[in-house]
Image (spheres, rainbow, N blue to C red):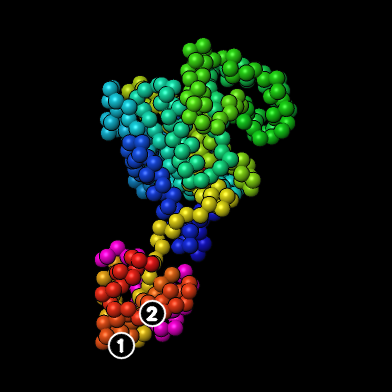
Amino acid sequence: MQKVKGTYDVLPQHSSQWLFLEQHIHQIMKKHHISYVRTPVFEYYDVFHRQTEASDMVTKETYDFDDRGGRKITLRPEGTAGVIRSIVENKLITPNQILKTYYLGANYRYERPQKGRYREFYQTGIEMIGEKDAMLDAELIQIAYELISKLGIQHIVVKLNHLGDVNSREAYKDALKAFLEPLKDQLSDESKNRLTTNPLRILDSKIPSDQALLKDAPHFASYISDEDKVYFKEILEILTKYNIPFEVDEKLVRGLDYYSHVVFEVQTQIEGFGSQNALGGGGRYDNLVSELGGPDVSGIGFALGLERLLLACELQDISFDDVNNIEVSVLHLDKHVKKEAYEVYKFLLEHQIKADFDFSNKAFKTQLKNAIQSNIPYVIIIGEEEVSNKTVQIKNLNTQTQETIMQDEILNYMNKK
Ligand code: AMP
């Protein structure tokens, strides 16, 4: 049996990095008073396939199926829509308060797998709903930046753009279409299709010939109201004040269709990342909440990909504290004293020492070899002599020194070392 294409297993040798990353995320969210929500990995098809949503993700990449009861179901390809569905269904939006929530979980997209791109992948993200305010937008971008930079990841930059409100976005879309229509034959096949489905996405085409055609395209900035320009400027001023490295990128549109106003992406410039260099991104949405049956309120959100965060850490040689690190393993010299050795192990655990016990009935030599292979720094060895004298032998596997101590001195010894 093999795993499904585009999926991966988190094996014991890597699982502590995952646990560390997840704890890091929960801690930062807690610090900012953002509440955790967890929604199902599958939703009714309509949650993701709304009329206005024509992104590549929902038209081509979702896992859709009918369940045995004939319901049309979709595995969630992203976090936002399910979270908003839940917030609306549970009536969590109140007129006087901003709702701040975050999620962490698996998403599913039928994309072509490559480095940093999987069919099952994990995202964490924040949704802040109930106010449209430049300070709130800047705060969200700063938290996204903090989540990444506090891991020790360097060479990151926030790319931002302002798409204007829905009207200016539509007006710009028409202008771009009118500009590209006569050049249609010279566009790549992908961009040609997008001319009808999602013309804004042509702006972030990675194909050089498409980019060359776009050189004289109309500029987004000329379609944006003065009020929106002031709003955007305020965001940039706050980011400058708080030392967030950013660049305004007029071609940044992001894949999801529901964004308007500010959109952003946190990109890494680490070598070896390849084309998938966005660690995460997000933007403001004006209509999503009402489209999913909620009140007419604006929200802003972002999502970060956990696999890419770990890849960035790996490429920059960032090592994590091993959250499972065992300090000592208790071994038995023969099976007549296994129960007594087990008692010592339980005693250590009770006193918060990270201990392990060799449950195997293997020879002592094998037990020791296993402890050495697992990089456990100390072993406690118990044989018949130790049991009758109420002692233990304690061996430092790094220095190879061994001494005999009284059992009631173990805690002292372990806490002092
Ligand atoms: P998106 O939801 O497409 O805006 O993506 C937000 C972030 O999720 C990206 O910047 C990636 O870090 C991550 N991501 C998106 N799609 C994938 C995928 N197929 N595999 C791994 N990470 C992904």
Kindly check if marks 2 and 1 are in contact, taking CB atoms under 8 A apart as contact: no
The residue positioned 59% from the left and 14% from the top of the image is 222
Above or below residue 23? Residue 417 is below
Locate residue 266 relative to residue 271 in the image: left or right. Answer: left
Q: Amino acid at mark 2?
A: Glu
Give the class, few, some or many, for how many residues have Cα within 10 Å of label 2's Cα (few <14, many ≥20): few
Which is nearer the N-term, disc 2 or disc 1?
A: 1
Does the magenta portion include 383? Answer: no
Compute the Cα span from label 2 to label 1. 16 Å
The residue positioned 58% from the left and 26% from the top of the image is 248
The residue positioned 67% from the left and 20% from the top of the image is 217
- State whether residue 46 appears in this view: no
Above or below residue 114? Residue 410 is below
Which residue is identified by label 1? Answer: 384
- State whether residue 96 appears in this view: yes
Decide which of 48, 70 is in the foreground and name it: 48
Is disc 1 placed on a helix, strand or loop? helix
Decide which of 229, 241 is in the foreground and name it: 241
> Magenta region: which residues?
350-376
Res 139 quadrant in image? top left
Locate residue 408 relative to residue 67 in the image: left or right. Answer: left
Whether the residue carrying mark 1 lies under 8 Å from ligand 1 is answered with no
Residue 35: image location, x then y, percent: 32, 38
The residue positioned 41% from the left and 47% from the top of the image is 24
Residue 153: image location, x then y, percent: 53, 44
Residue 302: image location, x then y, percent: 45, 34
Is label 2 or label 1 in front?
2
Q: Amino acid at mark 1?
A: Glu
Res 215 quadrant in image? top right
Which residue is identified by label 2? Answer: 403
Whether the residue carrying mark 2 lies under 8 Å from ligand 1 is answered with no
Does the magenta portion include 361? Answer: yes
